[in-house]
Amino acid sequence: VQLVESGGGLVQAGGSLRLSCAASGGAFSSHAMGWFRQTPGKEREFVALINWIGDNTWYADSVKGRFIASRDNAKNTLFLEMMSVTPEDTAVYYCAGTGARLLPVRDRAQYEYWGQGTQVTVSS
């Protein structure tokens, strides 16, 4: 599975941004899909996870209530709706796919497929 993120950019604090992740070359609908983020000098951290069908989601406490993960299996696309963003949300955001069957999975080591990342910068 190849993953390509898009939608990153510069946004003001309090604003919104929608990230997309287009999948190709594999069975997108058979993978649970996650979002991670990373800032310089820090480990890549879990942000959100959505199951295969898209009817169950999990979030990091830092984004719960502000971010929404969704997916369109017909279009092989994953989304992350980011709302009420803060400068602390500034990071490179990655989508990732896991074949794990017991969810949630927050450990990045259990994700087999990764996109190249998209930069999100929140100005204060």
Image: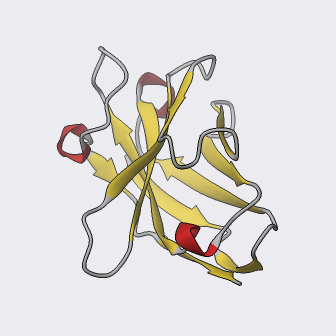
Q: Return the x and y of residue 21 as percentages of the image width and height.
A: 57, 54
- Picture residue at 78% right of the left edge, 79% below the top: 12
Q: Return the x and y of residue 107 as percentages of the image width and height.
A: 24, 40
Asked which quadrant contains residue 53, the reply is top right
Extreme right residue here?
15
Q: In which quadrant of the rendered image does the C terminus lie? A: bottom right
114 relative to 77 in the view: left or right: left
Q: Return the x and y of residue 95 as percentages of the image width and height.
A: 45, 53
Q: Return the x and y of residue 17 as percentages of the image width and height.
A: 75, 64
What colouring style does the render use?
secondary structure
Asked which quadrant contains residue 101, the reply is top left
Answer above or below: position of 40 versus 117. Answer: below
108 relative to 35 in the view: left or right: left
Answer above or below: position of 43 versus 27. Answer: below
Picture mark count: 0
Asked which quadrant contains residue 105, the reply is top left
- Picture residue at 37% right of the left edge, 23% below the top: 104
113 relative to 67 in the view: left or right: left
Q: Please state which of residues 50 and 63 is positioned toward the viewer in this rendering.
A: 63
- Picture residue at 66% right of the left edge, 36% below the top: 70
